[in-house]
């Protein structure tokens, strides 16, 4: 099976690093970005299969970055997991074209299960 690429986008470095370790332990190739603009730069460098996207970030928030991904023909097929401390209803007010949503805090098991589901892998 091919190795899937995951991009973790979160301005809280500890959160991003913890998720990166979780995904790496599961055999994924992982990169991190700490704001939406950095996420777009990372996508251009290494096309991810899934982006785990925080909402509230400096420079460019997660919804702005996700909209940019969806607007580009080359990146619109990337699966997006919105991962925010805001309610899904609030996030949907800014952007609703994501593939899955998890509200922070949530367990690593939940995040891993959703990512695997998005990739079509068995839990």
Image: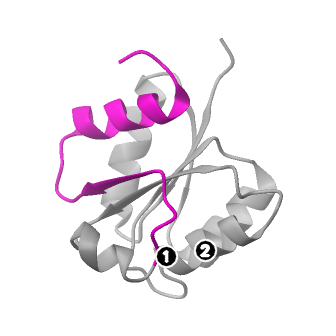
Taking the magenta stretch, the answer to whether it contains residue 78 is no
Label 2 sits on residue: 67
Q: Quadrant of residue 94?
A: bottom left
Q: Badge 1: few (under 14), some or many (20 or more) residues near its Cα, within 10 Å?
A: many
Left-right relation of 80 to 123: right
Q: Quadrant of residue 76?
A: bottom right
The one of 97 and 114 positioned closer to us in this rendering: 97
The secondary element bearing badge 1 is classed as helix
Label 1 sits on residue: 63
Q: Which residues are magenta?
A: 95-123
Taking the magenta stretch, the answer to whether it contains residue 105 is yes
Q: Is residue 50 above or below residue 4?
A: below
Q: Are marks 2 and 1 in contact (CB under 8 Å)?
A: yes
Q: Is residue 60 above or below residue 32?
A: below
Left-right relation of 21 to 63: left
Q: Alpha carbon of mark 2 to alpha carbon of mark 1: how far?
A: 6 Å
The secondary element bearing badge 2 is classed as helix
- Residue placed at 72% from the left, 67% from the top? 41
Q: Percent position (x, y) of residue 38?
A: 63, 71
């Amino acid at each position: 099976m091919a190795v899937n690429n995951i991009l973790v986008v979160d301005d809280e470095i500890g959160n991003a690093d913890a998720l990166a370790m979780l995904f790496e332990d599961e055999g994924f190739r992982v990169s991190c970005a700490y704001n939406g603009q950095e996420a777009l730069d990372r996508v251009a460098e290494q096309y991810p299969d899934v982006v785990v996207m925080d909402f509230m970030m400096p420079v460019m928030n997660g919804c702005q970055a996700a909209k940019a991904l969806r607007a580009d023909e080359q990146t619109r097929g990337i699966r997006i997991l919105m991962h925010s401390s805001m309610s899904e209803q609030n996030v949907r007010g800014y952007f609703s074209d994501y593939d899955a949503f998890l509200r922070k805090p949530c367990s690593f098991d939940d995040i891993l299960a959703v990512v695997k589901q998005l990739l079509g892998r068995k839990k």
